[in-house]
Image (cartoon, rainbow, N blue to C red):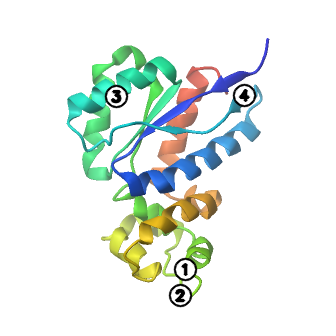
C-alpha cells in the first residue's frame, strides 16, 4: 500500500491571518510528519474562498464543500468568536472530528510576538518588542504591539508571511492556545490514521 496524502483546507478571518497562518501550518505539519511512524505525504494547506467573518450559513456551506475534497478543515477565529467554529462542528456531526478550530486567546498577532528573533529578522531596524512565549496571550492589544514592533508601517501585514516562515515552533509550543490547536490537529490526524 502506498503512502497516504494528507490534505488540509483553511478558513481564516481575513487575508493578514492567512498570510501568517499558511506558512506556519505547513511548517507545523512538516514537523508532525517527521514524528509520525506511519508516514504520509503533504503538499500544503489550501486557503478557502470565504473568510470566517462571513455569515455563518455561508461559512457552513464552504466548510461542507471543503470536507468533500480535504481530510481536515481548519477554522480560524479570534478568541471572542470561538463559538462560531463550535457551531459549525455541531451542524456537521458526522464530520465534526475533521474540523479543527484554530483559535488564539486574543488575536493571531499575539503568536507573531512569541519569537523576538523572528521579529528582528522581519524588522531589523527596530528593537524587537516580542514577549516571552507564555506571556503573549496576556497582551491586551497584540495588533498595536506588533505594528510598533514592525516599525509602524502601513503595510506591516506583508511581514506576516515572513513571520509565518520564521517564528520558532518551539516558542509557539509554549503558548497554551497554540499547544491546544496542535493537540486538536494531532487528534484529528490520529482519528484519520495519519499518525
Q: What mark, if any, has residue 40 been given in the picture?
A: 4
At 49% across and 74% down in the image, what residue appears? 131
Q: Quadrant of residue 153?
A: bottom left
Disc 2 crowd, CA 10 A, few/some/many (<14, 14-19, 20+): some
Comes first in the chain, label 2 or label 4 = 4
In front of the other: 96 or 24: 24
- Name of the residue lying farthest toward the top: 1
> Percent x, y for residue 18?
45, 51
Comes first in the chain, label 4 or label 1 = 4
Query: Viewed as shown, does residue 177 lie left or right of 121?
Result: left
At 22% across and 33% down in the image, what residue appears? 56
Disc 4 crowd, CA 10 A, few/some/many (<14, 14-19, 20+): some
Q: What mark, if any, has residue 166 been given in the picture?
A: none
Mark 1 and mark 2 residues within 8 Å of each other at the beta carbon: no
- Marks 3 and 4, how far apart at CA: 26 Å
In the picture of the structure, the residue carrying the numbered disc 3 is 62
In the picture of the structure, the residue carrying the numbered disc 1 is 123
In the picture of the structure, the residue carrying the numbered disc 2 is 127
Amino acid at each position: 500500500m502506498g503512502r497516504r496524502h494528507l490534505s488540509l483546507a483553511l478558513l481564516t478571518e481575513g487575508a493578514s491571518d492567512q498570510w501568517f497562518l499558511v506558512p506556519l501550518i505547513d511548517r507545523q505539519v512538516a514537523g508532525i510528519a517527521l514524528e509520525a511512524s506511519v508516514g504520509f505525504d503533504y503538499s500544503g494547506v489550501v486557503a478557502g474562498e470565504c473568510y470566517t467573518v462571513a455569515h455563518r450559513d455561508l461559512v457552513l456551506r464552504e466548510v461542507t464543500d471543503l470536507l468533500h475534497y480535504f481530510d481536515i478543515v481548519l477554522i480560524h477565529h479570534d478568541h471572542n468568536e470561538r463559538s462560531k467554529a463550535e457551531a459549525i462542528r455541531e451542524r456537521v456531526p458526522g464530520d465534526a472530528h475533521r474540523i479543527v478550530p484554530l483559535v488564539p486567546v486574543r488575536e493571531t498577532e499575539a503568536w507573531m510576538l512569541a519569537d523576538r528573533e523572528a521579529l528582528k529578522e522581519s524588522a531589523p531596524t527596530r528593537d524587537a518588542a516580542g514577549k516571552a512565549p507564555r506571556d503573549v496571550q496576556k497582551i491586551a492589544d497584540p495588533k498595536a504591539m506588533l505594528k510598533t514592533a514592525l516599525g509602524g508601517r502601513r503595510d506591516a501585514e506583508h511581514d506576516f508571511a515572513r513571520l509565518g516562515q520564521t517564528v520558532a515552533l518551539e516558542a509557539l509550543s509554549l503558548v497554551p492556545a497554540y499547544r491546544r490547536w496542535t493537540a486538536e490537529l494531532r487528534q484529528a490526524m490520529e482519528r484519520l490514521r495519519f499518525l
